[in-house]
Amino acid sequence: MSLPAVAKKDFQDTVRSRGMVVLVALFSLLVAVFAYVIRPQGQADQFATELLLSAFVGPVLVTGLVPLVGVVVGYNAVSGERESGSLKLLLSLPHSRADVVFGKVAGRGAALALATLAGFLLPAIVLVATPVTFNAGSYLGYTVFAAALGVVFVAIAVGCSAAVATQQRALIAGITVYALFVLMWGLFTGRVIGAFGGPIEALPVSMGEIRTFLDVANPTAGVEVLANAFLADQLFSGDQVNQQISAVAMLLFWTLAPPLFGLLKFERDDL
């Protein structure tokens, strides 16, 4: 029961933190303002919830802000306690290092998921009060995908935190990952394909398939693919099933691989 105990404590501490409250309030306010500003004016045609989420809120706010909050929530999970000395006390209890790493992923990930769902409440009220075709099912489903994106980046940040000795290094690693996935992924994949064009063309797959894989290898793009398919009522159906399955696989990879890598490094460290 050690891992659940660590997860419970981290969940409670994260939910109660002033920084989390501020981040949730800021995110909720931005989404609400965005929804209000782009609403139809006067007697304009109804504006579907699905269009608002997939074309405006998702690409502009969710894929940019939620990963950043995930990094902020997770970067000091292990390294912060290591610097303060409280990690030795934690490990003196019947907790293994694996309990600590994955307990913190579970606790902080759950806290951010709950905060994300809470952050979408005010925008929902705004949408209900404006002349939109408000689909509660689509809206709630989209918030689940947004929360999942936050959990993935918490896992990445906690993995970085476990792999290094200081909060500063963990933050630099987390911000680097954020910059790669959110800001520079298109440039990165373009250079990869350009550099290895010959070898890739020799493989028994098309260039389009390689590009599709590189797209969904980015967790932000993977969540976008799944969320947009859900909003279009085409989740795991139609001609994009393979792409969606690949997106799910990569999201699971990014949720598990960084904490495992961080744990391997953490296990070898002398505290």
Image (cartoon, rainbow, N blue to C red):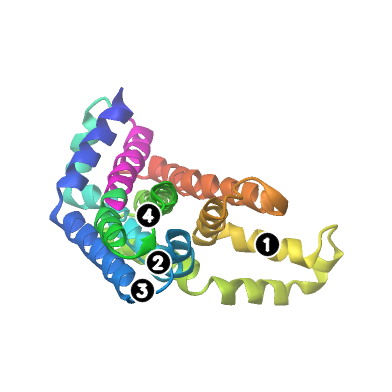
Residue 43 has which mark? 3
Which dot marks residue 101? Answer: none
Q: Examine the image and state in which quarter residue 53 appears.
A: bottom left
Q: Position of residue 176 (x, y in %)?
A: 42, 68
Instruction: Label 4: state its secondary structure.
Output: helix
Closer to the camera: disc 4 or disc 1?
A: 1
Image-based side of 213 in relation to 66, left or right: right
Depth check: give the residue in front, 209 or 172: 209
The residue drawn where x is 14% and y is 46% is 16
Rendered position, 268 above or below 36: above
Instruction: Name the residue carrying label 1.
Output: 212
SS at mark 1? Answer: helix
Q: Residue under circle 4?
A: 157
Mark 1: few/some/many CA within 10 Å (<14, 14-19, 20+): some
Please determine whether, in this image, residue 110 is positioned above or below residue 57.
Answer: above
| Label disc, if present, on residue 57 of the rendered structure | 2
Q: Is residue 33 left or right of residue 190?
A: left
Choose between 62 and 257: the one closer to the eye: 62
Q: Secondary structure at mark 2?
A: helix
Query: Residue 122: horizontal and vertical position, in percent?
Result: 24, 57
Q: Is residue 171 a member of the stretch shown in magenta? A: no
Label 3 sits on a secondary structure element that is loop
Start and end of the magenta stretch?
A: 95-116
Residue 21 rendering spot, x and y as whole percentages? 17, 55
Q: What whole-number distance in Å separates the C-alpha atoms at marks 3 and 1?
A: 41 Å
Labels 3 and 2: the sequence-earlier one: 3
Of mark 3 and mark 1, the one earlier in the sequence is 3
Amino acid tagged 2: Val
In the picture, which quadrant includes the N terminus?
Answer: top left
The image quadrant of residue 37 is bottom left
User: Label 4 vs label 2: CA separation?
Assistant: 24 Å
- Residue visible at 42% across and 66% down in the picture: 46
